[in-house]
Structure formats: C-alpha cells, structure tokens
Amino acid sequence: MTDLTALVGSRICHDLISPLGAIGNGMELLAMAAAETPDDAPGEELALISDSVARANARIRMFRLAFGAAGDGAEVAGREVCEILADYYGGSRHNVTAEPPAALSRAMAKVALLAVLCAETALPRGGRIALSWSEGRVVMQAEAERMSLDPRLWTPLTEGALCHEDLRPAEVQFALLPIALAEAGRRLTFDHDETHLTLAF
C-alpha cells in the first residue's frame, strides 16, 4: 500500500530544495561581487542570509530522508547520512556522530534518522548521540548529564505500540519510527539510565 503521507513529504522537500539551492547560488555570486567592492559590501547581512539558507537546506535534507518515502530497494551513501547529520546538528547543543557502511538501504537510513530525532528529545540541554553499524545491526547511544524521557512518548515506542494520541508536530517521529521499523523488518531494543540511552535495531 502506498504511503501517501511519506510521498507528500518527499514532494514538498523535493520542490523546496531547488529554489533554496538557487538562493544559495545567488548568495555566492553576491559574495563574489561584494569582494570586488569591499567598501560597499554588506558582509554581515550576506553572512546571515547565507547561514539561514544553509540551515534550511540541512533541515530539508534531513526531513526528506527521515519523513519521506523510503523507496523499494533504494540505497543511500553512508557519507550522505553523515553529512546530513553534521549539517543538521552543526552549531547546536547536540554532538551527533555516525559510522555507517559505505551504502545502506534508504529504509534503514530512515529508521536511523528517526531514532536520532527521538533521542534528541531526551537531551533537552544537549549531549552526545552516536550511531554505529555492526553485522547488519544499528546501535544508537546517547549520553547527557541527565536524561529526560517523557513516558507519554517513550512507553508506547519501547512496547512496540503506535503512538498517535496527543502528539505535537515536533514529536511526530515517535509515531513514524515504529512504522519504519516494521517496514524495514526490524525490532527495537531499548535501555536507559539517568545519563545514558541505547536504542538498537
């Protein structure tokens, strides 16, 4: 059965990434022109706009892979997953690293990114999140001075139940992760204490 929600997400991200790329290219041209006339160059303004475009691009790339259609048998380069995470979390309070294989299925990349987005909510003051792949299994470890796991979100997830009720838009990953796991044929294991969180699938 076609996942229309995922297709809509893919379509929106696809249609937005092109104009954002064009804006980014335009900013590069403006920066080059400004370099030739430094006395009149609006350096801070250009830097602010360029940074905003880069952040928007990073978010769309992340959302396209995490919330978009996985595609039957489609693959994604491990390097791209690393770049997406680095760009999305760059400059934030979350230090996210990944050691994926050279290529992985788009379905598993989707699961991994949704898991990271879930883990992020448990680290409201920042922390470290690390993804590793070993013998076909993915392990995500998160660490912070203090974890904050909302039972409303985490209990259904760890029990394999679908979490739909009372979700805010920023929490949609908790409803999507169980579906993505089922589509990828994976089961989630979960462990945590006051400072650590581990998800494996």
Image (cartoon, helix red, strand yellow):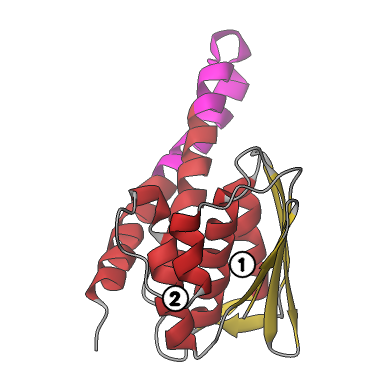
- Nearest-to-viewer mark from 2 and 1: 2
| Range covered by the magenta-colored residues | 22-48
* Residue situated in front as seen by the camera: 34 or 1: 1
- What label does residue 133 carry, if any? none
* Residue 98 spot, x, y in % from top left: 72, 65
**Residue 193 coordinates in the image, percent (x, y):** 73, 58
Q: Is residue 91 left or right of residue 7?
A: right
User: From the image, which quarter does the N terminus lie in?
Assistant: bottom left
Looking at this view, is 94 or 82 the one in front? 94
Q: Residues within 10 Å of mark 1 (few under 14, many from 20)?
A: some
The residue tagged 1 is 80
Q: Where does residue 101 sit, x and y in percent of width and height? A: 71, 80
Q: Residue at the location (73% across, 51% down)?
A: 194
Q: Nearer the viewer, residue 103 or 126?
A: 126
Q: Is residue 33 visible?
A: no
Q: Is residue 107 magenta?
A: no
Residue 176 is left or right of residue 5, and the answer is right
Residue 201 appears in which quarter of the rendering? Answer: bottom right
Please report whichever mark, 2 or 1, sits nearer to the chain's N-terminal start: 1
Give SS at disc 2: helix
Type of amino acid under label 2: Pro
Q: Which mark is residue 178?
A: 2
| Count of all numbered marks drawn on residues in the image | 2
Q: Residue at x 65, y 44 (%)?
A: 90
Left or right relative to 5: residue 169: right
Q: Is 129 left or right of 178, judged from the image as shown? A: right
